[in-house]
Amino acid sequence: MNPEGELNLMAGRKVLAITERQFAVLRVLWEHGPMTVRGLMEHLPRGDRQPYTTVLGLLHGIEKAGLVDHEKEGLTHRYRPTVSRQEATASLLSDFLARFFHGSAEQLILGLVDADKLALDELRAIEARVSSVSDRASADGEGAGASARRRRGRKKP
């Protein structure tokens, strides 16, 4: 991933590339709303031990990438996210699936199962969610998996 958190073009689509520290900043903004640098420092892990200029640099990087913007309030700036948590998560997961699993969510889930990274209750929750999506697709007249293929941009073989 690009250390500056810039949006990159891969295969003709925008991909969110962001560092863990930049994602932590976004997480705080999603949870607490717009904040100043000092406000962020109070909520970031180790934020009170990070220099002001370090947090400001993180914000500048993700602002340059278009993930936050700011409004001037006197001498300070109040930063807010320009992407939702859902949009960022979808972009990161899509990129991860494309790069490591050739776009196959099934291979990702099976890999997690094989590595014993999913508890039985998590598997049941996934199964329930898949079942509800399948039920909705059937009610809409789509075959099972049609909406997932459409989201991934694939046609039925």
Image: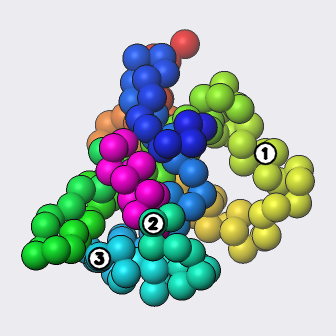
Q: Which residue is mark 2?
A: 53
Q: Which residue is mark 3?
A: 35
**Looking at the image, is mark 1 or mark 3 earlier in the sequence?**
3
Residue farthest to the top? 157
Q: CA distance from mark 1 to mark 3?
A: 40 Å
Q: CA distance from mark 1 to mark 2?
A: 43 Å
Nearer to us in this view, 150 or 156: 150
| 100 drawn magenta | no
Residue farthest to the right? 115
The mark closer to the camera, 3 or 2, is 2
Disc 3 crowd rating (10 Å Cα; few below 14, some 14-19, many 20+) is: some
Which residue corresponds to the image point at 12% horizontal and 74% vertical from the top-left?
73
Q: Quadrant of the N terminus?
A: top right
- Indicate the secondary structure of the residue bearing disc 2: helix
**Amino acid type for the residue under numbered disc 3:** Met
**Looking at the image, is mark 3 or mark 2 earlier in the sequence?**
3
Q: Which residues are magenta?
A: 55-65
**Amino acid type for the residue under numbered disc 2:** Thr
- The prevailing secondary structure element of the residues shown in magenta is helix
Nearer to us in this view, 40 or 156: 40
